[in-house]
Image (spheres, grey):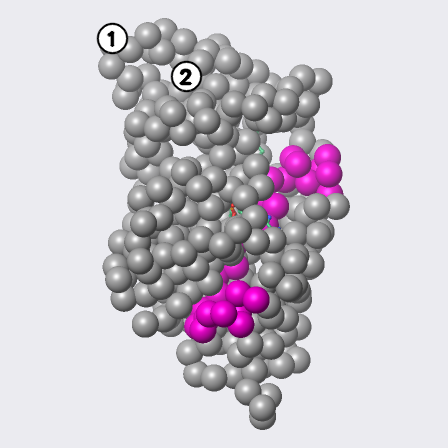
Amino acid sequence: MKTYLVTGGAGFIGSNYIHYMFRKYGDSIRIINVDVLTYAGNLENLRDVENRENYMFIRADITDKEAIQKIFAEHEIDRVVHFAAESHVDRSIKNPEVFVKTNVLGTAVMLNCAKAAWEQPDGTFAEGKRFLHVSTDEVYGSLEEEGTYFYETTPYAPHSPYSASKASSDMLVKSYIDTYHFPANITNCSNNYGPYQFPEKLIPLIINNALQGKTLPVYGDGKNVRDWLYVDDHAKGIDMVMEKGRLGETYNIGGHNEKQNIEIVTIIIDTLLEMLPKSDPRRELVSRDLITYVEDRKGHDRRYAIAPDKIRAEIGWEPETMFAEGIRKTIQWFFEHEEWMKNVTSGDYQKYYEDMYQNR
Ligand code: NAD
Ligand code: DAU
């Protein structure tokens, strides 16, 4: 039975990945979820799996070398899937340092501890040990022209403190591959959406605000383009790279689903109006009139678009959920998890929202 150490498993993509893996592999794998539970980490996301015998949660900080060493000493880890990070661009613009600490130092600690645990006396690594570093398309910078895409060979050109920290972490992983032949892969994925996404990110924020009749903040001219992927398709891609990827390689993950932000916002409004029953009082609140153009994000990247040619050709990965279906599934999930939304938006979220949006 393979043991996976998943970092950041209480966050958005990590928790969806853990659900995906248990749906796919059932009792034939073991997962240890290591998460320090920042504002973005939420054990409610894992209620369905917390009593499984093949699941364990350990609260630890990935920058805490001793804590991570202890986990590797106490458990025979076969695979590391490294999600843990500070992930929100706007927060990185206000407070970059924690991004450097978690994303760069944290990745260095994870790499070092895995290397120390896995390296054999002759400097090679035992068969089956693998480290997958989950990264982002933002490391490639910004595309201006339609019809251009990010390939694995595109030079890195990060702009925000978040993407600079992720680019640095990717470089560290590459350095371990080149220097030690460390058994790792990197995946660079486009924007994810789906259940359990924290409402600081565009899609859950718009759903949550619209249902309360609050303004829908659109940065700049609303024409920035993101390439949206349903989170289960990302989880599937990570699993396929872990199983079939060539060691040392980078794979871009994205489903050719580019949309301007303003399109996303209007699709959400229209879908909410379609899905809410006539008797639901929230229906009266949802309206395009809520759209409010606000001050742009500093250094706002104009367009991201992934070319997923390599992962398709080498590994056979294809996205399964088209946007029209994925957004309905996501909205349905938020309808069914009002309590989840209430819990994550109480307390600190109010202060975050005021700080981030009051002067925009
Ligand atoms: P998230 O912010 O929802 O979750 C991050 C998780 O990491 C949280 O559970 C948090 O508690 C944990 N964490 C943060 N600092 C930690 C530390 N020092 N020690 C241990 N745990 C810590 O993020 P997400 O959106 O799920 O993103 C997960 C990963 O995927 C990140 O590495 C991100 O860069 C990458 N990624 C995200 C997207 C996206 O669209 N969200 C797209 C591509 C890549
Ligand atoms: O591309 C992958 C990246 O996608 C990940 O690496 C990041 O972790 C993830 O947060 C996401 O980054 P973005 O900055 O693209 O996502 P966000 O949801 O914050 O914003 C999406 C777009 O919507 C972006 O162009 C900014 C805009 N936006 C965002 C918010 C929160 C608005 O117009 N209004 C808003 O209130």
The structure residue drawn at horizontal position 38% and vertical position 53%, both measured from the top left corner, is 18
**In the rendered structure, which amino acid carries the disc numbered 1?**
Ser
The relative height of residue 51 versus residue 272 in the rendered view (above or below) is below
In this image, 271 relative to 348: left or right? left
Provide the residue designation for mark 2.
211
Q: Who is closer to the viewer here, 62 or 301?
A: 62
Q: Between marks 2 and 1, how big is the CA–CA gap? A: 14 Å
Can residue 210 be seen in the rendering of this structure? yes
SS under mark 2 = helix
The relative height of residue 108 versus residue 128 in the rendered view (above or below) is above
The structure residue drawn at horizontal position 27% and vertical position 54%, both measured from the top left corner, is 23
- The picture quadrant where one finds residue 195 is top left
- The picture quadrant where one finds residue 53 is bottom left
Q: Who is closer to the viewer here, 1 or 317?
A: 1
Please state the extent of the stretch shown in magenta in the rendering.
70-96
Callout 2 crowding tier (Cα within 10 Å): few <14, some 14–19, many ≥20: some
Provide the residue designation for mark 1.
279
The structure residue drawn at horizontal position 54% and vertical position 39%, both measured from the top left corner, is 40
Location of the C terminus by quadrant is: top right
Residue 81 x/y as whole percent: 48, 61
Residue 77 x/y as whole percent: 46, 71
* 87 in the magenta segment: yes
Can residue 236 be seen in the rendering of this structure? no
Residue 38 x/y as whole percent: 58, 41
SS under mark 1 = loop
- The picture quadrant where one finds residue 120 is bottom right
In this image, 225 relative to 211: left or right? right
Residue 127 x/y as whole percent: 43, 83
The relative height of residue 64 versus residue 220 in the rendered view (above or below) is below
